[in-house]
Amino acid sequence: MLRTARHPRIPNPPQACRRPPQLVAPELRLVAIMAKHWFREFARRFGFPNNYTTLDLETSGLSPIAHLICTYGYTVVRDRQPVETKEVVLDWTTHPDIDQLALQDDLHRVQAAMERNGRPFHHSYTYLQQYGIDPIRAIEQLLTLIEAAENNDEILVLHNGWAFDVEFIKAAIHNWLHIQWEFHPGLVYDSGIMEKASQLTSAFSPMPQENESMRDWASRIYAARAAVKWNLDQHCASRYNLLPQVGVMQADMHKAASDSLVIHALVEAHRRLAEGVDLHDGAPDDTTVLFEG
């Protein structure tokens, strides 16, 4: 069975940017311009950015084919405020089709890699046993969450979502629910790709191209080989002072629910930049033409 997203055009879409233009720091101007473009696109299609859902995954490795979703966390945002934050833990430790020794080895490798890089690790084998639910039911709930966003004409916000989370979600839905799920190319606002693109030089053509979907733009920017940092827990949290805004401690990062809250804070930071940038104040001619609405 193939399911695809429905995206009807909403009547009288709200305006994404209401505040009068304010001064934006030069180093943040590019991300402000790109955010303004995507906010306008989403406002026409979904009514974004007032209502949306942020989503984060923690996994047993980097391969959607060989590894598993261990936890996912989400924050439902209404009128720009979080109204629900939840973590769902998948207990693979008793599933008959899972090699338990291989799962333990995978989790140990993830833990070692994260700790080498000074990052906290939370989703241990014991954690899955203690807090997890049936993984098939958890994946069904995840699909329901995605479908609810679609049915409400909203979007999902993920950090490095198109390259990582989306592929894991598609694989999980296909492998365990036997549904061939396809994401609409404009469903996911990728806050990580926004950050990466904002640091690229003109040689990489970081601006969205005419008629380029968020998925296509994210794929192109992700493939750009450049020495820039755009991770959520270090670069973005520091650049925008995100953690105090949502009451998350550094030690709680990489808990899926905590990360989903921080992604919400990042979206709102992007929104403030988009509302503050004046596209007619010194913007390059090609940028001005592209982003005029």
Image (cartoon, grey):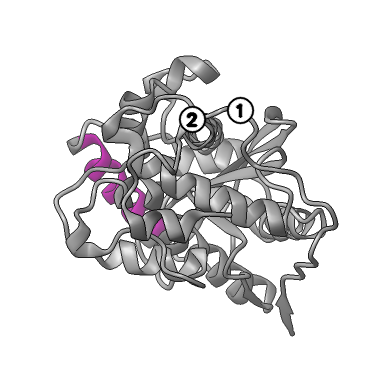
Query: Is 89 in front, or is 234?
Result: 234
Q: Which residue is mark 2?
A: 276
Please state which amino acid type lies under the numbered disc 1: Arg
The reply to whether discs 1 and 2 touch (Cβ–Cβ < 8 Å) is yes
Is 160 on the left or on the right of 184, as rendered?
left
Which residue lies at the image location 34% right of the left edge and 69% below the top edge? 220
Query: Is 191 in front, or is 116?
Result: 191
Is 12 on the left or on the right of 188, as rendered?
right
Q: Which residues are magenta?
A: 103-115
The crowd level at tag 1 (other Cα within 10 Å; few <14, some 14-19, many 20+) is few
Local SS, label 2: helix
Task: Please determine whether, in this image, residue 96 is positioned above or below residue 260.
Answer: below
Q: Which residue is mark 1?
A: 19
Q: Main secondary structure of the magenta part?
A: helix
Query: Is 151 in front, or is 13?
Result: 13
Is residue 114 in the magenta section? Answer: yes
